[in-house]
Image (spheres, rainbow, N blue to C red):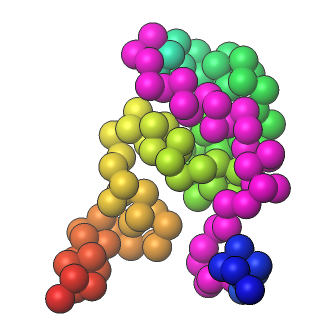
Amino acid sequence: MSYLDDKTPIPGTIMFDGQKSRMGYGLNKMCYSFNDESARNEFTADENAYCTKYKLSDEQKKAVKDRDIIALLELGGSIYYLAKFAGILKLNMQGIGALQTGLTLEEFKQKLVDAGK
């Protein structure tokens, strides 16, 4: 049995699989576009129009508007592409980790330090 066959859920983890990938295609494509400054500027000028350009669902648009990274993960966002969106929000990966775990940023940083001991 390979690790790909193991579908045992990990508590608190949103699994990014083929189904999530298909669900989040437009969202991830939009987030990838944020590699270009012109795309970031276009997004900040009119977020809804930019989301529509990439055919985001109404749920995805709401999550973008609400800055709900967790909902975006549940709606098919890949953490690697959502990191581009988080950058626009001035969040780094530790900030996203704090959101995912329900901890403050300082609590999450301490958790990382403690885990490294």
- Image position of 55 with respect to 2: above or below: above
Residue 116: image quadrant is bottom left
Q: Is residue 94 visible?
A: yes
Task: Identify the residue at image location x=58%, y=58%.
Answer: 70
Q: Is residue 75 visible?
A: no
Q: Position of residue 77 (x, y in %)?
A: 64, 48
Count of marks, rendered view: 0
Quadrant of the image for the N terminus?
bottom right
- Image position of 2 with respect to 76: above or below: below
**Residue closer to the observer: 12 or 80:** 80
Q: Which residue is the extreme one toward the front? A: 1
Quadrant of the image for the C terminus?
bottom left
Seen in the image, is 7 located left or right of residue 98?
right
Is 10 contained in the magenta span?
A: yes
Residue 62: image quadrant is top right
> What residue span does the magenta drawing correspond to?
9-38
Seen in the image, is 103 located left or right of residue 12?
left
**Residue closer to the observer: 65 or 21:** 21
**Residue closer to the observer: 110 or 7:** 7
Task: Identify the residue at image location x=46%, y=72%.
Answer: 102
Task: Identify the residue at image location x=58%, y=15%.
Answer: 46
Q: Position of residue 108 (x, y in %)?
A: 31, 72
Residue 29: image quadrant is top right
- Image position of 38 with respect to 2: above or below: above
Is 87 contained in the magenta span?
A: no
Q: Position of residue 73 (x, y in %)?
A: 63, 55
Q: Position of residue 82 (x, y in %)?
A: 52, 44
Task: Identify the residue at image location x=36%, y=46%.
Answer: 91
